[in-house]
Amino acid sequence: MTTELLDDVVETVLADGQVRSSLRRIVGVIGQYALLCVLSVVVLAPLFMTLIQALSPPLAYIDAGKPLHPVEVAWKDRTWFTGGAWSVLLRTAVILAAFAWLQRVGSPHGSWLRHAREIATVRRLVAIVGGTVTLTVLLGPVFGSLHAADGRTAGLFFLAVAGVAVTQTIGFHEPGHRSVPVAILDALAVSVVAVAAAMVFVGATVWTQSWASSGLGEAMLRSLTMSVLITVAQVVTAILAAYAFVFLDFPFKRILFAAALATLLLPLEVTLVGNIALIRQLGWIDSMQGLVLPFAASAMGIFLIRQGFRGIPKDIQDAVRIDGHGHLTFLTRFAIPLNRPVIASFTVISALAAWNQYLWPRSIIETDASNTLQIALRSNISENIAQANVTVAAALVSAVPVAVMLVAFQRHIIRGLTAGAVK
C-alpha cells in the first residue's frame, strides 16, 4: 500500500514538472516572438516613414503637421491590366514570384530544388496561381475607388484581402504540420501585406514620375549591367588568385600576397587623378569598360576566399591527384563547393559596392546619356526641389534590386558569416 502511494506521488510530481516545463517553453516562445515583432517594428519604422514621404507631396505633408499617414496621394485611373503589355506581364510575374516564394517559406520541407515534389503540390500551385489571378482581378475596383475617392475603398480592400486569403489558406494548410486556424491566420497576414503593397506600389502615380525623371530606368539598367560585370570579374579573379596563393608554389608568393593586400591601404581618392588620366588616354570616357575594368579585381575578395581555401584538408587534394585529376577539377568540384558560403558572401559585398559607386562614375561620365543610377539620383534631387517626394520614391525604387539580392542570398550570407563559429 505504501509502495503504491509512493508511485502515485512520483507520477503526480513528474506530471506536474512536465506541465510546468511545457508552460515555460510556451511562454518563452511567445516572448521570443513578441521581441522579434518589436524589433521588426523598430527596424521597419524608418522605411515606413520614408514610404509615407514618397507618397505625399512635401508642401501638403508639412502643412498637415507630418502625420503618420500619406497626405493627398495622387492615384492612377487604371486597372491591373492597363499600362501596356510589358508592364502588365512584369507586374504579374512579380506577384506570381512573390506568392511562390511565400509558399516556399511556408513549406516545412525546405528548398524548392531539393524537395520539388513535396512543395510543388496541387494545393500550392492552386494557391500561387489562384492568388495571382484573384489579386489582379480584385485590385481593379480598388484602384477605381482610390482614384474616384468614393468612400468604398476600405470595403473593396477587405474583399480583396478575403479573396486572396482563401487561395493562400489552401496552400498553407499542411496536414500534420500546420492546422487550419494557423493556416488561416498566416493567409490573412500574407493577404493584407500583398494587397496593400500592390495598391501602394502600382496605384500611386509617384512611382511613374520617379521612373521617368532623369532617365532613371536607363540609368538603373546601366548600373545593373556595371554591377553584374564587376561582380563576376571580381569573383572570378578572386577565386583564381586565392587558389594560386594557397595551392600553388611559385617564387615570391608571400610578397605578392602582401602587395595585393597593401592595395587595401590606398583609397580610391589617392589614385583617382592618375586613373582618370589613364582612362582618357585609352579613350574610355563614357564607356562601360571604363566603369568596369578598373574594378575587375579585389584584394578583399582574394583575402576572404584564400582564408576559406586554407581550411580545405590537404588529404582531399592528394586524393584528387592520385585519381589523376588536375587543378581545374579540384577547383571546380571541391574547392568552390566547399567554400560556397564565403564566395556567396563576397559576391553580395562586391555587388553592393559596385551598385553604390558614385565617385568613379561621376569622374569619367560626361554625358547624361551615360549616367549611372547614383548620378541620376543626384540629378533628380536638383531637378525636383519642389517635389522632394519624387526623389524619395526614386531612391526607394533604386533599392529594390539590393533588397531582392539580399533575400536571394540570405542563407549563404548567414552561413558565410557563421562559418567556423561552431565545431
Image (cartoon, rainbow, N blue to C red):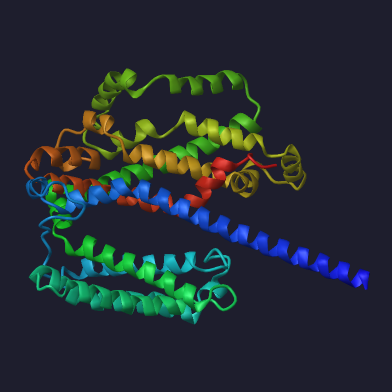
In x, y percent, where is residue 141? Answer: 17, 77
- Residue 107 or 187: which is nearer the viewer? 187
The C terminus lies in which quarter of the figure? Answer: top right
Q: Residue 240: which quarter of the image?
A: top right
Determine whether 72 is above or below 125 in the image.
above
- Residue 371 or 45: which is nearer the viewer? 45
x 52%, y 32%: residue: 302
The N terminus lies in which quarter of the figure? Answer: bottom right
Give the side of residue 30 with respect to residue 130, left or right. right
Give the side of residue 358 with respect to residue 385, left or right. right
Determine whether 286 is above or below 184 in the image.
above
In x, y percent, where is residue 46? Answer: 29, 45
In x, y percent, where is residue 273? Answer: 27, 19
Is residue 252 in sight in this rendering? yes
Q: Residue 24: which quarter of the image?
A: bottom right
Give the side of residue 71 with respect to residue 222, left or right. left
x 90%, y 72%: residue: 4
Give the side of residue 41 with respect to residue 217, left or right. right
Is residue 81 in sight in this rendering? no
